Structures are given as C-alpha cells and as structure tokens.
Amino acid sequence: MAELTFSLKENPRIDRWLRFEPDRRVRIGTGKVELGQGVLTALAQIAAEELDLSIDQIRMMSGNSVEGPGEGYTASSWSIEHSGGAIRLVAAEVRALALKQAALRLNAAPDELTIVEGAFLRNGVSSGIDYWSIAGELDLSAEVTGSVPAKPPSSYRLVGTSVPRIDLPAKLTGSGFIQDMTFPGMLHARTLRQPGRGAELVSLDEDAVRRRAGAEIRIVRVENFVAFVGVDETAVRTAAVAASERAVWTDARSLRPEQATPGWVASQPSDDRLMGDPRPELALDRVSARFTRSFLSHGSIAPSCAVAVYRDGMLSVWSHGQGMQPLRENIAKTLGLPLGNVACHHVQGPGCYGHNGADDAAFDAALVAMAMPGSPIRLMWRREEEFGHEPLSSAMTVAVHAALDPAGRPLDWTTEIWSATHGQRPGVGGAYLLAADALKEPPLQRKPFDIPLERGGGAARNGIPLYEMGAKRIDFHLIHDVPVRTSSLRGLGATLNVFAIEGFVDDLAARVGEDPLAYRLSMLSDPRARRVVEKAAAMANWASRDAGGTGSGLGIGLARYKNSSAYAAVVAAVEVDEAVRVTDVWCAVDAGLVINPDGLVNQIEGNIVQAISWTLIEEVRFGPQGISTTDWQSYPVIRFSDVPEICVELVDASEHPPLGVGECAGGPTAAAIGNAVAHALGARIHDMPMTRERIMAAILA
Amino acid sequence: MSKPLTLTVNGRDHDLDVSGTTPLLDVLRNSLGLKGSRYGCGLEQCGACMVLIDGAAEYSCSREVGTLAGYSITTVEGLGTMEALHPLQQAFLDEQAGQCGYCLSGILIAAKAFLDRNPDPTRAEVAAALDRNLCRCGSHPRILRAVLRAAAVMRRQVA
C-alpha cells in the first residue's frame, strides 16, 4: 500500500480531489496554484495518465479554499511531489473503483475491460458505457485508502511528454490574470501604506487628496490603514500618490543605508544554533573564506492585486497568493470572522518567485470590502508599494571553514551563516498579514523563527555540502532584529550557501593545483550528483578550459536542492572587463521521473536567468524614507541583451520519484558565475552582486 | 471638464467621454474593456503596457489619451485572436515562450513593431529591440527564439 502523503492525510475525501462533471470532463482539485511554473499542466498530465483520459478531458480547479484540497503554500518545489503524488493515488483509486463498477454493470471480468479517453472497452470493443455513465454509482465522498497501486512508469503515455502549457494561449491573447477581473459595480482601490509597524497617522488633508483625485472617491480609514476607493481607477491612483506625499505620521520607520549591508546584518545580536555533526573536540587548523549577498526584491513584474466582496455575511476574496487555505485562515483570524464566512479563490497573477505582496494585498482588499459591504473591490498596490513593502530576501553572510587532510581534502567542514529569516509567510511561526500592523491591536511581534532544516531550511538551506567529508555542520546565526520584513525568495538561503560552498571548493582545488572538476569528483560518491557534474562538464567542453587569468573564464557549480530534491550542475562561461558578461550557460539536471520535459526546462532556464540577475546586478538599498529601490531604475534586473545562450539537458532518471525543479539551478548558476569570474580574473569576488567596483577591487587586490 | 474624444483602437473608432489627461492604459482597460495591455509600473520602465501607436511600440501607462486623436492604436487584442493567432502569437506558443505570461502582451507588441522594420534580424538585434521590455521569469531565451521563428514565418508569407 502506498504511503499517504501529507496532502492526502490532510484531505482524505476523494471528492475534494476528483469529480466527474456533466460535460464529460473530470475536475481535478489541487491546493497548489499556477505561478507561471506550469504546475497545472503537469498535474493535469498526472491525472489524465492514471485515469486513461486525454489532457483536454481534465479541468483543473486550483486554489479553491472551500471545495478543493488544502495543501498549504505553493512553495519549496513541493507541488509535484506532494500534490502530484496525491492526485496520482486518488486517480488510480477512482479508476479502479470505476472499473469494478463497470465490470459489474457489464457482467464482465475486470481484466476484460480497458479504458480509452474515459470510455470502457470490453476486449477492445466499445461497451457503451464510460466514467460518466457510472459516476453516480461511485461513492466519491469516501476517503482515499492508498490501496490501489498507480501505473508503472513503463506504461506512461502522457507523463513524460511535453504537453503544451494549458494557460498560455489565454495569456498570449490578452487575458488570464486577476488584474483583468471585473464585477458589476466593482470599485477600484489603492492604499496609503503605514510606514512601518507602530507608525500612526497624525493628519491627512483629505480635501487636498480629493481635489487631486479629480473624480469622486471615498476614503476608507481603519485605524492606520487608509484606502482610496472609487469607480475611476485613475482617480484613486492619483489620490494614493497625493496622500503619500501629504500624510503626516509619527514614529515612521526610517532606515540607514548601512542597514542594507550584509555586514550590518551579521553584526546584530543573533539566535544561534548548530545543525549537523557536533563540533570537533580539538581545535583544528582551518582555512576560511567569507561570502555575502545583499537584500533582494522579488521584483514581480506587476504590483500585487486582489478582489474582495463582503455580501450577506460572507467575505469572498480572489488572490494570486501562493496558498488559499492559509490565506483564508489568516484573513478570518485577523478580522475575527468564522472560517466558514471567508472563501478564498486563486486567480493567476504575475510571477511572484516566493512570498511577495500578494497575501497582503488580499487582506487590504478584504479590509476595504468589509468597510463597504456589497461592493466588489479591486485593490492593486502601486509599483513603489510592492518594492517598498513586500517582504525582502535577507542579506546574508556565509563563512566557510575547512580543516584539510594532507591531500588537501576537507576533513571537517563548517558553513557559518548570518541571516534574517527566510520564512515569514502569514501564519508561519507567528507571522501575519501586513495591514494587521495598522489595526487597533497589532499582532504580537514574532519570536525568532526560520524554516527548520527538516523542512528544507530557510537561511540554512543547502548549507551542508554534498561532498564526502569527515564531519559537516551548519553554524547558524539567525538575526532577528532587522528593520525590514524578510521572507522566502526562490531558493531561499541556498543561493548564497551554494555560491559560498562551491566557490570555496574551487579555492581548495587551487590550493593543491587540481582541476576543479576532478577535485569535486574525487570527493563525490553520490552517482546521481556525479552524473550531472560529468554531463554539464561534457556539454561545456570542460576539457578545453585554459589556465585562466585571461579575462575569459569557465566555472562550475553543483547542488542538490534542499539536499533532497533535484540535482543541478551548471557551467558558466564569462567575459570580464568593467562588467561581467555571461556568454553561455550549460546545465544538467536530474529531477527523477519527469512529468513534462519542456515545462521543466522552461523552469530551469528561468531560474538560471534570474540567478544571473541576482549575481550580477540586484541589490536593495535603504534610505531615510525606508526601502529606496522602488522602481526599475533604482532596482535594475537583467534585460534581453544580457541573457546568454542557455543549454539545459535532463539526465534520464525515470526510475526515481519525481522531484521539484523550479529552484534547483539558482545556487549552482550563482556559483558557476562566481567560479568563472575567479577563473577569468585570477582573483575571486566574494560578494554579490558583482558590481564594477567589486571587479576593480578584485583585479587590484 | 472633459470634451468628447475619438480614439481609433484596433481599427475601430471609439467616442470617449474621459479627461484628456487620463492615461491611455486606463482608457484601454477600463473604458474599452481591452485588458490585454497590462499595468506593470506606471513609470514607462517595464514595457508591460506597450501598444502600437501608428506602428511604433509605445508605453501606454503614462501617455495622455488627449494627445492621441487621429492616431491608430493597436493592442495585443488587435494582433490576433485565439481562433486566428498572429504569427508572433503562434510562434510564442510553438516555443512555449512564457512562464507567468504577464509581460507577453507588451513583448508581442514590441516584437511586431520591430519585425515590421527589420524582417530578418539576428538574435542580438531582437534582444536589443526588446531591451525596453522586462521579463522577470527568465523566459528570454524562448522569447528570442519565438521572435526569430515568427520572423521566418512572416518572411515566407510575404514572399
């Protein structure tokens, strides 16, 4: 019997996952949501495969907090493992139930029957009945038992093929997003953001704001939460801008530029913990290196948006957040409503890459809707609001320390990490929705918390190297008192941890005069890790790599995401003068059984491009008014001309379970660039982003 | 305060009763119900709002509608429909060039304006032409391939 996954234990009823619909479709429910990663297509493939349906006979229902399964947040690359695993078992069980019922109806032996596109064939001939003609005889309110084995991968016809994304046609022809929703009588809303917890609005010249708006608006105020609401979107946007220029606050948050530096963060008091092997009993001679990274923004291409309506005691919210069940619980709790009076529905939005402003905007919309019963409210954040008030990815410092054996291999390894939390999603570890700070009784300040290593870790994610060494540990300094909210950005701590570990491994290879690839392989026993490293090296023609120092470089990076998910090895080629230019990237990935190869490659390519941007140019800055990088000029991201040729290959590992892949290549890409730059310059840059100043400093050092 | 204004969008004339200072994007989305042009920044920095104005790809988020009488405006809805895709839209589907897809309307528009000027470009030329458009998901390699693919199809159609 298959072990029931977390998702099935939480949602045992079959009909939360699967229903037969009258139009000869099957509705598949999932708590996971489409963020641009192609998950709905992949989950539809899994369902169609097990049920012997075609892909267009599946209708996905995603992120429906009332009718669908609750599966927490769509995060940490768990969707295919958790939701995919659940849907596979549910579909297999329903197929078996249906087959048994059909056999009864036809007075046939079950093994005489096959299913093609939902129709039962008897000895290959149409039987005249299908799933839908017997659906009423199946008890889908029963609980899943997990007793029916899923199909063997060798029999797959849909899983493993590049089914085109089901959501892309709408998005190419001008629809498909939450921003596009309309309801009769819908009003637009924008907010005036409280400048930090504890800030109080002393005065706001409402007449002046109305005059600037130029059309009728309503001003909704709930303690220190303010919104401008009206029929005319232009007017409410203008009002919000005018208000942010005029509002007078006490105790507004003020930041200093140095607080944005990894060094400042690392110098703050910390909550310390050791993970992995115990410290060595005797002090060892160690070599060390220190790496840093700035605060990063998610940089979603559009500000967060939500729609909410409060009608007949029922609050309905449409959101592009990553988890509708958690959102429902958080909104109900914060507003003091019974859970049954709140419904949250996912609608697709711009990519978020982690915990951005989406949940907070949903709560803002809910607050306005509660103040204006009966009116559907479409609330959108402003660009500067998204940059200035969404949770950031924490600035980090990572020092790696190794004691070496006579051959120059690490005997004892410590990854020492200073970082604020990477896990502050509402409802997790006492975290809450942003505007709760503005209400009469703000929630308690949360205690130091980061995602535990057994759940993939936050700052500590991928802090343990894959390589064979005597002892490996993480020495984690969780910094609690940072003046900005920090939370999950794609990859979490893995980006800098892999950058640091893999950079240091290259330096250790150089100490003993060995090729970085050969050095890695000499201490790598996991055959799956070896295969991706060897594959990426072959793709990049690693054998032709020169002695370096010429301004052109080739570097490699390896990780297994969360040390438990997909393996990725990346080789980057760079040219360095006043700036780093990445010219080519080669990447080999082992994701176990692949559901949709092209969808997977698409995700990996995107992760690589984003990681190039993080590594070379991205950096949040602070100023007296708070976060000062509030547009695309002050927070530049990679543009088309700087995107290299990227070649991704998947290593066949279909005998292994499917592994989430959307975050696996980021750390290895940053590491490969770091190592390629070191190879090009003959000197290492330890700090991201690799700015002109840092390049010059490395050359002159 | 406002005086009637006629705006030509996707080949149709629309009489509008809006202030001439209203951004074109708000008029397209809220007055005309054309939701394909997208709000990204409102600052002419990201390109999600791009439309064709007399054939040139322009930001619509800050462009005052009162300046546009007599111009011909084309939005992504005017490129093609689900039933009759423009070769660019078809090429983006063929290359699966998109992830979240929010930037794609503006990129399709920018690519259309560019290919009309340069029907046989190199990858670097396409990239340079799209540098005013941001894509945060990292779909760039596929988007570049898709534009080159569409260019080839469109050249064959002309030939």
Image (tube, coloured by chain):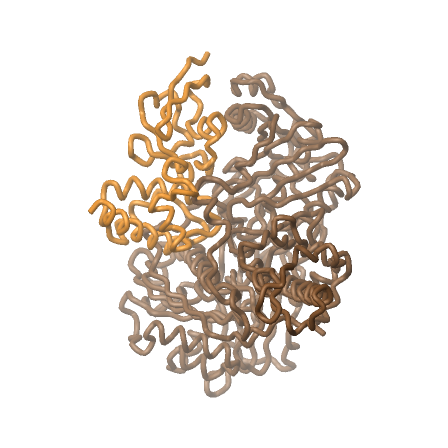
Chain colours: A brown, B orange
Q: Is residue A235 above or below residue B113?
A: above
Camera-nearest residue between A533 and A499: A533
User: What x and y, as percent, mark residue A109?
Assistant: 69, 73
Q: Is residue A122 above or below residue B107?
A: below
Q: Residue furthest left?
A: B159
Camera-nearest residue between A84 and A212: A84
Q: Is residue A388 left or right of residue A553?
A: right
Q: Quadrant of residue A105?
A: bottom right
Which residue appears at 52% of the width and 40% of the height? A303
Q: Residue furthest bottom?
A: A406
Q: Is residue A646 visible?
A: yes
Q: Quadrant of residue A121?
A: bottom right
Which residue appears at 71% of the width and 36% of the height? A315
Assign the N terminus of chain A to one quadrant of the image: bottom right
Q: Is residue A194 left or right of residue A670?
A: right
Which residue appears at 59% of the width and 30% of the height? A189
Q: Is residue A457 visible?
A: no
Q: Is residue B76 left or right of residue A496?
A: left
User: What x and y, as percent, mark residue A540?
Assistant: 34, 72
Which residue appears at 70% of the width and 54% of the height? A70
Q: Is residue B21 above or below residue A463?
A: above
Camera-nearest residue between A312 and A107: A107
Assign the C terminus of chain A to one quadrant of the image: bottom left
Q: Is residue A419 left or right of residue B125?
A: right
User: What x and y, as percent, mark residue A230?
Assistant: 59, 24
Q: How many marks?
A: 0
Q: Quadrant of residue A538?
A: bottom left
Camera-nearest residue between A484 and A323: A323
User: What x and y, as percent, mark residue B70?
Assistant: 31, 21
